[in-house]
Amino acid sequence: MIKYPCEDLTSNKRDIEYFTLENKPEKCPLCNSIQEPSFVSAYILETNRIEAIFKCNKRSCNHLFINLLSKNSISYYSYRVGLSYPMRPEKVQFNADITQTSPLFVDIYNQANAAESSGLNHIAGMGYRKSLEFLIKDYLIKHRGEDDQTIKAAFLGKCIKLYLSENIKQVAERASWLGNDETHYHRVWEDRDIQDLKKLINLTVYWISSEIQTEKYITEMDSRKK
């Protein structure tokens, strides 16, 4: 088994110790590519705490990152990899119909996802709620032909109740209920959380995408029939 050098920063002499790794990180936390990153160096910061620096082997990334090693009980000098940072969550992808309809929805949703991945659940919930509003309003303006000034000025709940088809309305309305819980002092839906909000947003995305596709096929085929 390979022995890796480790500088002891807890010692005035800054001695070099050696340790073995049970495994290496399985991916780069910045580009999220699956690989075996290269070991660069490691440091003992306190008893049984080692932070190791690794380098991503993907040419388009090539960044350094830190991994918090934890002691393996099998051997005194054996460690296993733990949390890597800095971490950049993998971007959530949406189909072309959604990204073209509301680029800001995609951007805001992914910022909320990044906050959630960092453990900032209270901020993430507000972000997901905001992304829903951009999705609904952009859809109504771009695909339903509603007046942009009217839609921009209206509350989200009114937009959902007055302008959406039944399938979208049913899931979007419930997503807005949970989204409001993420922004208000008093929580109404105690048995629901941010994961339920995300599922309802994804269902809203599904029905909106289905309606855009339906409209597209009907328009294209009816024009050729004429």
Image: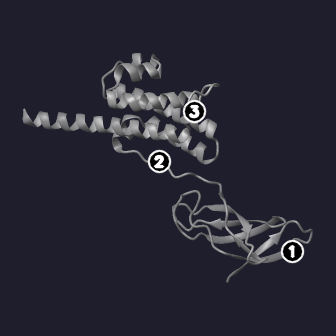
Is 202 situated above or below 54?
A: above
Nearest to the eye among marks 1 and 3: give it: 3
Farthest-out residue, front:
191
Indicate the secondary structure of the residue bearing disc 1: loop
What residue is rendered at 39% in x and 21% in y? Answer: 161
Real-space Cα distance between discs 1 and 3?
49 Å
Density class for disc 3 (Cα within 10 Å; few <14, some 14-19, many ≥20) is some
Where is the C terminus found, in terms of image quarters?
Answer: top left
- Find out whether the residues at labels 3 and 2 contact each other: C-beta distance under 8 Å: no
Residue 64, horizontal then vertical, whole percent? 64, 62
In the displayed structure image, the side of residue 161 where residue 33 appears, left or right: right
Farthest-out residue, bottom:
1
Closer-to-camera residue (175/28): 175
Where is the N terminus found, in terms of image quarters?
Answer: bottom right
The residue beneath circle 1 is: 15
Q: Is residue 73 visible from the viewing direction of this image? A: yes
What residue is rendered at 56% in x and 64% in y? Answer: 27
The residue beneath circle 3 is: 126
Please name the amino acid that badge 1 sits on.
Answer: Asp
Density class for disc 1 (Cα within 10 Å; few <14, some 14-19, many ≥20) is few
The residue beneath circle 2 is: 92
Is 114 situated above or below 85?
A: above
What residue is rendered at 53% in x and 42% in y? Answer: 195
Indicate the secondary structure of the residue bearing disc 3: helix
Closer-to-camera residue (194/208): 194
Residue 130, horizontal then vertical, whole percent? 52, 31
In the displayed structure image, the side of residue 162 where residue 57 appears, left or right: right
Residue 69, horizontal then vertical, whole percent? 72, 66
